[in-house]
Amino acid sequence: AQSVTQLDSQVPVFEEAPVELRCNYSSSVSVYLFWYVQYPNQGLQLLLKYLSGSTLVKGINGFEAEFNKSQTSFHLRKPSVHISDTAEYFCAVRKNTGNQFYFGTGTSLTVIP
Amino acid sequence: DVKVTQSSRYLVKRTGEKVFLECVQDMDHENMFWYRQDPGLGLRLIYFSYDVKMKEKGDIPEGYSVSREKKERFSLILESASTNQTSMYLCASRNGGGAGYEQYFGPGTRLTVT
């Protein structure tokens, strides 16, 4: 079975500071990796995804993530956060076969003015 | 843009009632999913469907059933609602043709069972 671990349930950070949200997964097969964001009272929307190729993936709103196969990690980063980045962030994994996505438990990012 | 809509944003039902949650997508996607979201537990898959009239159990199907009579519509049914089914319910759809296609989510239905 797949598992996705987001070690930090809550991350407070000051405005304009950098942030890293951590995601580790377990899988014996190749996977596709995704980061989603959920703003208050909304559904999830895609930030970025890794399918293949370059291990550094850039997404919307200035976010990027790096796939590290040896460490089975896909950490999300932003060099300078804004108040509007306050949201819940979910890491998700999908095997290269099958339809099911596996989500982490989420990280609540709070940007402090 | 892909649009996934859910019939209600907020719903309050009594214990024992039969509850229907409706989800509609407008992009001709093959795959549709129902999740529940609870604090500290993330998203857990209840059921998914990869085609009309086809369904597969997810990780927590107990107490739920689904129906997919048309490609664009996927319904979640709580046969007899219980208080432990109070949760946020999220529907998603996905194009089944490509391995890397992401899921698109609806805005969610917050269900309270009293």
Image (spheres, rainbow, N blue to C red):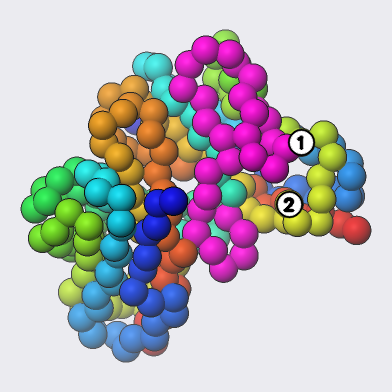
Tell me whether circle 1 and circle 2 mark residues in contact (CB < 8 Å): yes
What's the amino acid at mark 2? Answer: Asp
Q: Residues within 10 Å of mark 1 (few under 14, many from 20)?
A: some
Which residue is rendered at x = 89% and y = 41% of the image?
A17
Residue B49 lies in the magenta stretch: no
Who comes first in sequence, dot 1 or dot 2? 1
Magenta-highlighted residues: A38-65
In what quadrant of the picture does the N terminus of chain A appear?
top left
Q: Report the label total.
A: 2
Mark 1 belongs to chain: A
| Position of residue A93 measured from the top left corner of the image (x, y, whole percent) | 45, 32
Disc 2 element: helix
Q: If the image is split into quadrants, where does the C terminus of chain A sit?
A: bottom right
- Quadrant in which residue B17 is drawn: bottom left
Question: Can you say whether A102 is above or below B16 in the image?
Answer: above
Residue B26: x %, y % from top left = 30, 56
Q: Eyeballing the image, is B95 above or below A108?
A: above
**Seen in the image, is A28 located left or right of residue B70?**
right
Residue A78 circle label: 1
Q: Position of residue B15 (x, y in %)?
A: 29, 85
Q: Which mark is residue A28?
A: none
In the picture of the structure, the residue carrying the numbered disc 2 is A85
